[in-house]
């Protein structure tokens, strides 16, 4: 989930962390492993091709007070909430999801995170393209549906994220999501098609 500058990260990607997750150092090690995965390498490469230079400190592990897995903040980078994650797959998902937000922010000069439609669009794309809503992940969250699970999941997570935006009421978030759904769900850049 992206945030306007200066706001704290929040995300539709709530984890099911047990205990207190992991330490910042453990999470930093997992972030380093994430950076070697094909999907993360691909997204970083396309961010740089779009003119956004990612320094070595662009993705950092932090201890988060809010119950979120991570966030993207324009001008600051990506934070991964160590205390709400337990395993490498969760860290990879957060990094991928937030890199899609960073890519959207990079390629759209006029993206305004306080605009509910802009925010919803990036959340739709991040939910759809990151694998957040893969059938197995949904099953582990307790959501069982044979058909249409992916779009239902994306919609649920978009609503959770956009309603956390102080500029978006629940009604505004829902209207924004519906207004941009088709265009944003079908926008798979930088991928040729949804992974």
Image: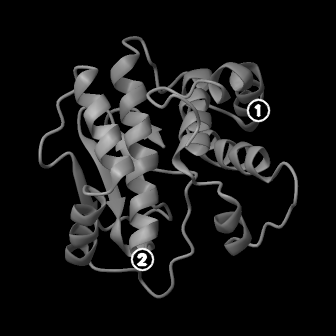
Between the C-alphas of marks 1 and 2, the distance is 32 Å
Quadrant where the C terminus sits is top right
- Residue 49 lies in quadrant: top left
The x and y percentages for residue 169 are: 69, 34
Left or right: where 99 falls relative to 172:
left
Q: Which residue is mark 1?
A: 174
Q: At x 39% / y 72%, what residue is drawn?
A: 88
Number of numbered discs overlaid on the protein picture: 2
- Residue 125 lies in quadrant: top right
Q: Nearer the viewer, mark 1 or mark 2?
A: 2
The x and y percentages for residue 47 are: 29, 30
Point out the tag, 1 or 2, that comes first from the N-terminus: 2
The x and y percentages for residue 15 are: 54, 68
Can residue 186 be seen?
Answer: yes
Q: Residues within 10 Å of mark 1 (few under 14, many from 20)?
A: some
Left or right: where 107 falls relative to 180:
left
Q: Which residue is mark 2?
A: 87
């Amino acid at each position: 989930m992206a945030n306007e500058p200066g706001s704290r990260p929040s995300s539709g990607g709530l984890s099911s962390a047990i205990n207190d997750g992991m330490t910042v150092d453990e999470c930093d090690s997992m972030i380093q492993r994430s950076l070697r995965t094909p999907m993360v390498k691909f997204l970083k490469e396309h961010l740089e091709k779009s003119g956004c230079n990612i320094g070595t400190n662009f993705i950092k592990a932090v201890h988060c007070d809010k119950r979120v897995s991570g966030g993207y903040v324009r001008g600051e980078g990506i934070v991964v909430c160590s205390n709400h994650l337990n395993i490498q797959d969760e860290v990879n998902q957060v990094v991928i999801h937030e890199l899609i937000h960073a890519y959207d922010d990079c390629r759209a000069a006029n993206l305004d995170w306080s605009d509910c439609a802009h925010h919803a669009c990036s959340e739709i794309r991040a939910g759809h393209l990151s694998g957040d809503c893969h059938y197995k992940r949904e099953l582990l969250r307790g959501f069982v549906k044979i058909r249409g699970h992916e779009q239902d999941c994306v919609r649920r997570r978009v609503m959770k994220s956009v309603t956390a935006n102080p500029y978006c009421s629940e009604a505004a978030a829902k209207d924004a999501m519906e207004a941009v759904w088709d265009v944003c769900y079908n926008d798979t850049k930088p991928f040729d098609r949804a992974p």
